[in-house]
Amino acid sequence: MSDSYFPISLHSLRIASIPPFDLFLVHKPASPPVLYRNKDLEFTEEVLEKLRQNDVQNLYVPRHQREDYFSYSSKMVSQTVKDPSVTVERKTRVVYDTTSTIMEDLFVSPRSNVRIQQAKETINDAIELMTNDEEATRKMMFLTCHDYYTYTHSVNVTIFATALMQRVLPHIGGEHDYKVIGEGFLLHDIGKSAIPPAVINKPGKLDEEEWRLMRRHPQIGQEILNSTRHGDPIIDSIVLQHHEKMNGKGYPHGLKSEEIHPYARICALADVFDAITTVRSYRDPLPTAEALRIMRDEMEDHFDWDYFNEFVKLFGDLNE
């Protein structure tokens, strides 16, 4: 596939909208994209159905039109979530696919103010959907991708952490801005944009220098957000502390127990769970039950035990 194009999900195209970008098709894996529809043509139900009949999952947009696509898609997510005529299934698919595409681009250009803002807006729509519709939360959890990419990991963690957040925060007391917390979940790993992929995906243990570099990603993430003026005390606490452990052996500051912000404790659970239940280049994913068992038996002093018990119940309820 030529680097001149990037894939988009059919779900990110809203029926009766007029995309301000060209749409291309790939007929064979090794063949170049060919023009399917010119920009400024209405995307209709008939067009969508024809694509589905031909088992088309993705279309392609020229990279020079990427800003047109991301501006369009972030608006379409909001319209779709608020549209009572759209099914919950479609809403969740639109939110997941569009947020993943935005995050993929953000990890390439992590200091893009525009892309960070679009990521925040789409995840705000996701949080609104999940907090107002229990069925949407269930469907979002079923949608999580099991192939590990840093950008899909960020979306998966947000979904798991938001589902857990809805269970534990009402019992903590005080006011909680769910949307801003969700932004923190989504951006928790933005500092990994500065870490070489060879280090992130390395099979086996990291050497001392690689580990030193990896341990810096929370602070790098905070620096990126502050430099783009997207820092916030809530977001900062999640970005900086999601690798802290209850036993004080985490990083970057070795915080322990109540020193770790509750939001970061929630994120830490979702972060580890998604990391061990997705496919990596060096190992197969663990099924949910096995992942939870390992987290309980081998990492018990890493997590807030009350939150972990609620996390286990979350998956029990999901399978009812």
Image (tube, rainbow, N blue to C red):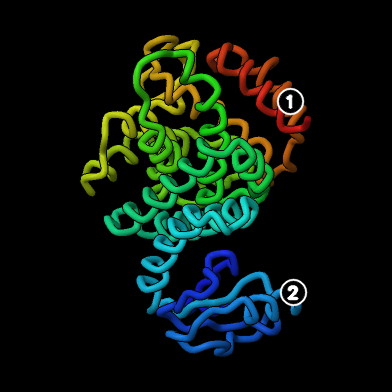
Q: Is residue 240 above or below residue 119?
A: above
Q: Amino acid at mark 1?
A: Gly
Question: Is residue 281 in view?
Answer: no
Question: Is residue 156 in view?
Answer: yes
Which residue lies under the disc numbered 2?
Answer: 55
Which image quadrant: the C terminus? top right
Q: Residue at x 44, y 65 (%)?
A: 73
Query: Is the Cβ of the residue at disc 1 closer than 8 Å to that at disc 2?
Result: no
Q: Residue at x 55, y 50 (%)?
A: 152
Q: Position of residue 103 (x, y in %)?
A: 45, 54
Q: Secondary structure at mark 2?
A: loop
Q: Residue at x 59, y 69 (%)?
A: 10
Q: 10 Å neighbourhood of mark 1: few (<14), some, or many (≥20)?
A: few
Q: Residue at x 64, y 49 (%)?
A: 145
Label placed on residue 316: 1
Residue 318 left/right relative to 202: right
Q: Position of residue 235 (x, y in %)?
A: 34, 34
Q: Secondary structure at mark 1?
A: helix
Q: Amino acid at mark 2?
A: Asp
